Image: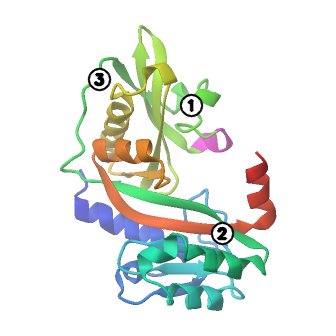
Amino acid sequence: MLTNQEIWTIALKQSAYDSNCLPEDFLAEKNVVTISQKHPLARKYLKLPLSCDLVSYGSNIVAQASEEIAPLVQKYIDRYPVEHCFETPNLHVLDDMLRSYGQKICFMAEYFLPDVDAVKELPCDYELRVLHQEDLTSLYLPQWSNALCEERKHLDVLGVGAYDNGRLIGLAGCSADCEMMYQIGVDVLPEYRRKGIASALTSRLALEILALDKVPFYCAAWCNIKSVRNAIRSGFRPAWVAMTAKDVGFVDSMNRE
């Protein structure tokens, strides 16, 4: 099984592919700004290049941006402390800067990596089954939309289901978003929540992924307390945060939904 240091190294390397920088840039004392561009090893769902994307592992900010927006982003991230750049009221300054370029802040998320000393199989009152790609084909339904992604079925490679007398009541799935890292998502039917099923599914799937010498990772909005608690209970720990801008039309279309 991978060690925590190996997991950390893999994550930094992947973030470097995603942000067009070097792994060590995320550990530097000073902020780093790069010009965003496509990379063949970047996470497959990232629609590179990005107009503005900020990532922090805690030490500094690595920002990728378009050539025209990069100077504004540099000015912004050098103006405020790292943690304040990702929160109001300061992020309104960045949002105002971006508007003249037809962009708005869109996605904000916290990412978690497993602590191999804390990830363990958790008890569950229901039967758990490991599911492979061929077992997932009939499960692309609204109730499993966090665990599986219909737009990228080919990336959903592994899952763990919880069953009550043969009925699927909870599902964790992982997407092979890049060569070495698989992202976990989880859903539990409403009437079965608050029974420890989500953490049992998440931890079991994390162990299955680690057994493949891949790195499981978990993403949640930092305001999604239920999801963050699930990550912590399942043996995951905060690793990095990200904030991404998209064009105004895209953001407005999401708000209309």
Mark on residue 246? none
Which residue is denoted by mark 3 in the rendering? 124
Say few, some or many: other residues with alpha carbon within 10 Å of mark 3 (under 14 / 14 to 19 / 20 or more).
Answer: some
What residue type is disc 1 on?
Trp
Mark toward the start of the polypeptide (2 vs 3): 3
Mark 3 to mark 1: distance in Å? Answer: 19 Å
- Residues tagged 2 and 1 counted as in contact (Cβ below 8 A): no
Provide residue 156's location: percent of width, then percent of height. Answer: 54, 40
Tell which of 224 and 207 is nearer to you.
224
Q: Is residue 175 left or right of residue 68?
A: left
Which residue is denoted by mark 1 in the rendering? 144
Mark 2 to mark 1: distance in Å? Answer: 27 Å
Say few, some or many: other residues with alpha carbon within 10 Å of mark 1 (under 14 / 14 to 19 / 20 or more).
Answer: many
Q: Is residue 18 left or right of residue 251?
A: left
Q: Which residues are magenta?
A: 150-154
Q: Is residue 227 left or right of residue 3?
A: right
Question: What is the secondary structure assignment of the residue under circle 2?
Answer: strand
Q: Is residue 227 left or right of residue 251?
A: left
Tell which of 241 and 93 is nearer to you.
93
Residue 16 is at least partly visible in this image: no
Location of the C terminus (image quadrant)? top right
What residue type is disc 2 on?
Ala
Residue 42 falls in image quadrant: bottom right
Mark 2 to mark 3: distance in Å? Answer: 40 Å
Which residue is denoted by mark 2 in the rendering? 245
- Residues tagged 3 and 1 counted as in contact (Cβ below 8 A): no
